[in-house]
Image (tube, grey):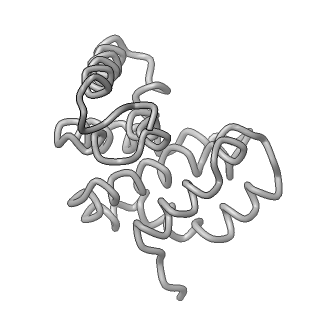
Amino acid sequence: MSTLPTPKAVVDFWREAGPEGWFGRRMAFDDRFRERFLAAHMAAARRELDHWMDSAEGALALMVLLDQFPRNCFRGTAHMFATDALALSLARTALARGYDREPEAALRLFCICPSSTARCWKTSTARSNCARRWAHRSTNTRASIGT
């Protein structure tokens, strides 16, 4: 049995992928993503990595594994959506804990991505509240959404 990656390894991989990996449709990227993190995705889906929710980095790693990973690695299959409900539930917890405030601006979007794929008003409202909170922070000297 292989050793599972750390939250840091997941987040570092995602950060390094950048917008081309995040939003592109490149089979080579999807294959590399699947090879490195399939076991972690499955463990997260089985709720074996819930303890990662104890930190902002861990929560972000779970969002990547449960929301982004299946969209890249199971394109065109039902499994692409299989962990949406879990990702949404964990995203709500992460937002309630303020974890969306910790990652650098480029990665903050992925804290709320499960909310953007859900189609309920309550979730849209939560997403809008996050956007307002981030906008408020951008006027604060501590942080800016663009940096």
Q: Horizontally, is 8 left or right of 82 in the view? A: left
Q: Nearer the viewer, residue 8 or 81?
A: 8
From the viewer's perspective, is residue 6 above or below residue 16? below
- For the C terminus, the quadrant is top left
Q: Horizontally, is 41 left or right of 101 in the view? A: right
Name the quadrant containing residue 130.
top left
Q: Horizontally, is 65 left or right of 97 in the view? A: right
Q: Nearer the viewer, residue 47 or 8?
A: 8
Q: Nearer the viewer, residue 89 or 78?
A: 89
Residue under the image location 63 percent in, 48 percent down = 18
Give the residue furthest to the left: 97
Residue under the image location 50 percent in, 44 percent down = 67
Q: Horizontally, is 39 left or right of 25 in the view? A: left
> In x, y percent, where is residue 43?
44, 67
Residue under the image location 35 percent in, 32 percent down = 144
> In x, y percent, where is residue 14?
56, 55
From the viewer's perspective, is residue 106 above or below residue 57? above
> In x, y percent, where is residue 89?
30, 39
> In x, y percent, where is residue 116?
46, 25
Residue under the image location 69 percent in, 48 percent down = 21
Give the residue furthest to the front: 141
Name the quadrant containing residue 108.
top left
